[in-house]
Amino acid sequence: MKTLIIIPSRMSATRLPGKPLLKINGLSIISHVSKKAEEANIGDVIIATEDQEIIDDVKSNGFNAILTSNKHKTGTDRIYEALKKSNIRDVDFIMNLQGDEPAIDIQDIVRLNDKMVENNSNIGTLAANIKDNKKLKNENIVKVIIENSLKENNFPRAKSFFRKSDQIDNVYHHIGVYCYSKDSLEKFVQLNQSKNEIENRLEQLRALDNNIDINVSLAKSSPIGVDTKEDYLALKKIMEYKN
């Protein structure tokens, strides 16, 4: 089974424009994520972007990048265009890594890929335990409710995803890494955005609204994503201290 990792990235993030090229330890955030993807050693890695500056940066660090349209509504549409433009054949699974999570755990990526291959699932994603119930009310933290409790060795199905919850049972912190079978990705991008997806600003709801299962793998912890300047400075401090 062959997996291709595609990392969508763009300069025009609303809360922190230019975020992919912010530096930590002298390396851009997008190149840190690309490095983690390569270290996972599960398949080729491509960065998919609408910005020439990102292409120049990642290529100067030895990574492969593809220029995509600037008309995409979602990251999934961008990775599908990159898949079609890449000359990589016989791909079974496509993993979509977020370009703003340089602290993602390599073992979580490997475990998700292993579970996709073992179960031949349609779509897989990651979630971590919620240690602080205040996160249930934080709309910036996406939650997933799962059909039964999440353990290291199981791969249960997601029932729904949401931004705010009063429920505590089988609710986990969703981490936006996705692995698609090639057929599921092709089917997904041809579907119209669902009402649920648009209202909640969560594109994974499009899959559930169209009866495409999403299985969930337990992640060791929730990586700090970079959404704001404060996130960037906090993560920079941690990563540079580790060095």
Image: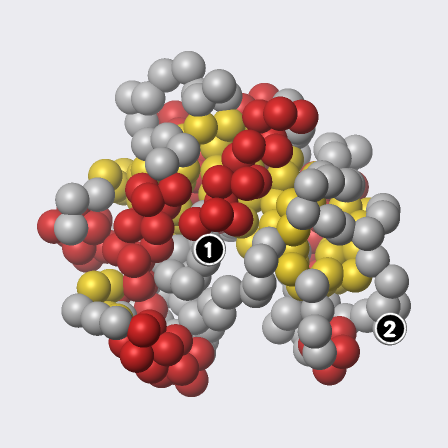
- Distance between the alpha carbons at the discs numbered 1 and 2: 29 Å
Of the residues under marks 1 and 2, which one precedes in the sequence?
1
User: Which color scheme did the rendering employ for the protein?
Assistant: secondary structure
Residue depicted at x 17% and y 55%: 57
Whether residue 14 is visible here, answered yes or no, is: no
Which residue is at 85% across, 68% downward? Answer: 168
Outermost residue on the left side: it is 60
Callout 1: SS: loop
Q: Of the numbered discs in the image, which one, if any, rests on residue 105?
A: 1
Label 1–label 2 contact, CB within 8 A = no
> Compared with residue 178, is residue 212 higher up or lower down, i.e. above or below?
above
- In the depicted structure, whether residue 83 falls above or below residue 174: above
Q: Tell me the residue that label 2 is attached to.
A: 166
Residue for point 85% across, 48% down: 148
Give 212 or 231, whichever is nearer the viewer: 231
> In the image, 44: left or right of 91?
left
Q: Nearer the viewer, mark 1 or mark 2?
A: 1
Q: Residue at x 77, y 41 (%)?
A: 157
Q: Secondary structure at mark 2?
A: loop
Q: Is residue 156 toward the left or the right of residue 48 in the image?
A: right
Residue 73, given in percent of the width and then of the height, sits at 51, 50
Q: Quadrant of residue 215?
A: top right
Instruction: Name the amino acid, label 1.
Output: Asp
Where in the figure is residue 239, as x and y percent of width and height? 33, 72
Q: Which mark is residue 178?
A: none
Classify 10 Å Cα crowding around label 1: few (below 14), some (14-19), many (20 and above). Answer: some
Three-letter amino acid code of the residue under disc 2? Asp
Q: Position of residue 35 (x, y in %)?
A: 29, 50
